[in-house]
Image: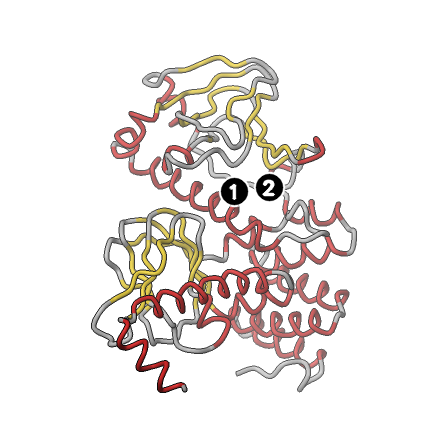
Amino acid sequence: MLKGPNQKSLHLQITLARAQLRKGNLKEGIETYFTAATEMVLKGDLAKATAIYKLILQADGNNPMALAFLSSLYHHQGLEAEARQLLTPKAAKTQPAETFPIDKIKLSEIDKLEKILPSRRVEKNEEIITKDRTNHNLFLVAEGRFQVILKEPGGRIRELATLDKGHFFGELTMLLPKRKATATVIALEAGKLLTVAEDDFRHFLKTRPPLMETLLSTAHRRLLEYTLRPLFRSGNDCDLPWLSRIVEIFKIRHFSAQELIIQEGERNQTLYVILDGQLQVSCQGHDATNEIPIITLNAGDFFGEFSLLTGEAASAAVRTLSTGWMASLKRREIDRLATHFPGFLPRILKSFRARKQDLIKKKIDSLNPNKLRQLSRGKG
């Protein structure tokens, strides 16, 4: 295990990282840099932390965690232009910083789809999807430019992304029909949209596997960003320009029904976020012969925080009830996030406390009256 800068000088740590990189050990070199940078943040030396993250990006220009942390440090220091430039794709400097995960369908594929899908003309400033309202279509952009925005209290409008030919939107409410739109989409100019109606959506995807993969990937990243936003929000981070980079460090996977994700009594070092599907949290009864359901988790919920926060064995089991998708993050990455974003773990802890109280109540309710009297006498 590498020793931190509190045991070696920062200079020696950087020298070690450079030596590792020269030998071709990219993973080890970057890990050494991260160790040093995290220690600098803990010490409050943001200037040195900033310099180290720049060194990481020299070695790995697309490292999502380094990009997220460096952008956040710029943001905290009031260097908004630097933060925007850091997160804006080089090929799209004229567009706003991308805080809304975007994938694009090949333009040749859009041209083919134009021949088989219904289309509609739209006028400039027309609102296509409205936040917090239901939507019944997948939209593929064939012509024009569209803007994804959030209308916030006080009338402030925050731009999330600009979409043009090949981009798509509306897939979240198609994949999760009960979910309302998480953002508003308006036309920046007159254009044309191809539409896939809700009734035809799943058949349309099944016949086009590559398109389904692109849609699923984007939908899950967008949903994960939407879910994580409240965990990272603070008074100084209302725009969260780096959040799309944090999304990239999560691992997303599909799950089947009746998978045991966390076993009661085992230690867990992973935080999970549900993107689609349902899971059941349950615990053993007092006599260990029956299972007590505690709560059903749905898209947007997270779990695994008990062992993660306390280091103790899990006090409940988590099993999937349906097929679906989840995102996960390992302990080391969570520790780094907690260092850079102090409000992250307290918000998870708040959920953990509420869930633990529910767990204790369910266990007490499961005791039969005779057993409960025996326990009460024993305490007396």
In the rendered image, which residue does mark 2 sit on?
98
Answer few, some or many: residues within 10 Å of disc 2's Cα (few below 14, many 20 plus, some between 14 and 19). Answer: many
Residue 82 placement (x, y as % from top left): 73, 49
Q: Residue at x 44, y 26 (%)?
A: 140
Could you give the CA–CA distance between mark 1 and mark 2, rounded to whole angstroms? Answer: 7 Å
Residue 147 drawn above or below residue 380: above
Q: Residue at x 67, y 58 (%)?
A: 70
Residue lying at 78% horizontally and 56% vertically, measured from the top left: 77
Q: Where residue 134 sits: x, y (%)?
A: 44, 28
Q: What label sits on residue 338 in the rendered view?
A: none
Residue type marked 2: Glu
In this picture, is 258 found above or below 208? below
Above-or-below relation of 198 to 211: above
Left-right relation of 263 to 270: left
> How many marks do you count on the picture?
2
Q: Quadrant of residue 124?
A: top right
Confirm or deny contact between disc 1 and disc 2 (CB under 8 A). Answer: yes
